[in-house]
Image (spheres, grey):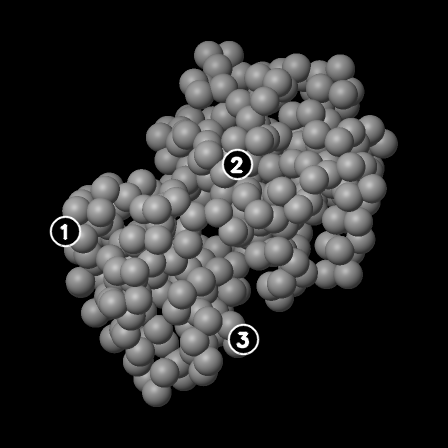
Amino acid sequence: MNSISYKEAAAFLKERDGFVVFTHANPDGDTIGSAAALVRILRSLGKRAVAVCADPIPQKLSFMDSDGIFTTELPKDIDTPISVDVASKAVLGAFGAFCDNQSFELTIDHHKINSLPCKRLLVRDNYIANGEIIYELALELGADIDKDTATALYAAICSDSGGFRYANTRAETYEYAAEFIRKGVDFVLINKLLFERKSPKQIDLERVAYNTLSLHYNGKLAVVAIDEDTATSLGVADSDYDVLNQIPRQISGVEVSAVLRPRDGATKVSLRSNEYFDVAEFAKRYGGGGHIHAAGYRFEGRVKDAASNLINDMDGAF
Ligand SMILES: [Mn+2]
């Protein structure tokens, strides 16, 4: 793995062709927006490019799924595989086997720890969104940013920054958003799609989540845990759970919030911190990763056990 500059990344993209841009499974606005924008930028340079995701693109992000940008199956012959916003093999989901016997030609990421096998790494781990790196790369390439590309970049940056509210949102983050708005991006609609639309199932899920909420260590740790039976009876999809992260973190005095729910016979643990606690460092103990204020891991076991392990492990942390 070799860390490269924007100049080197731009030269590499200009030289190569036949790009397949990989996103992470259980996709969010940042990975989908980054991939959609990068594919459009590469095509504007006359290159062949498509994007892939192991999971279906959620309805709320489907405005970026047009012009044949995303294909559901991995192409047979891949000249130049690239990843965006993918920190590890595990988060590639069903496409994880891809890197069993080959490396990504270029990995573009903003996670603190990236363990993906790759030949070239373009990382800005202090950026709130991967989409910001794609934009800066587009500037280096001198690529034309049309309205659709700007829309994907706006969605990427807006999504990971929680609507320009989270730490690591920089002055430049707002400046880039202003550029995208000048291109005609319908930011009112995107903000609404990303943050204000909830399905009836998600409201059911929130109702249950409030009932499971527990506070620990003088209210520094807040835990929401949806157990296996509840998840089955609600019939929620994996992507429905993203509304839950907001619930425990909003409580005043809470430093770390955790949302636990069943996934694929194990437990998915999502962690958020408000100020000082490095949740990425904590997630590493369980083989997970992420950012200082947002991270996650997979616990091989039931939700109940994942919750008690987590609570015990946080002893002495505050
Ligand atoms: Mn991201």
Q: Mark 2 or 1 closer to N-term?
A: 2
* Whether residue 105 is visible: yes
Three-letter amino acid code at the position of disc 2: Leu
For residue 275, which numbered disc appears in the image?
3
Indicate the secondary structure of the residue bearing disc 1: helix
Indicate the secondary structure of the residue bearing disc 3: loop
* Whether residue 123 is visible: no
The residue wearing badge 2 is 61
Q: Quadrant of residue 162?
A: bottom right
Q: Position of residue 139 (x, y in %)?
A: 82, 38
Q: Quadrant of residue 260?
A: bottom left
Question: Which label sits in the foreground, 3 or 2?
Answer: 2
Crowd tier of the residue under label 2, counting other residues whose Cα lies within 10 Å: few below 14, some 14–19, many 20 or above: some
Q: Is mark 3 within 8 Å of ligand 1?
A: no
The span from disc 2 to disc 1 (Cα, nearest Å) is: 29 Å
Q: Residue furthest left?
A: 229
Q: Position of residue 198 (x, y in %)?
A: 43, 48
Residue displayed at 29% across by 70% down: 213
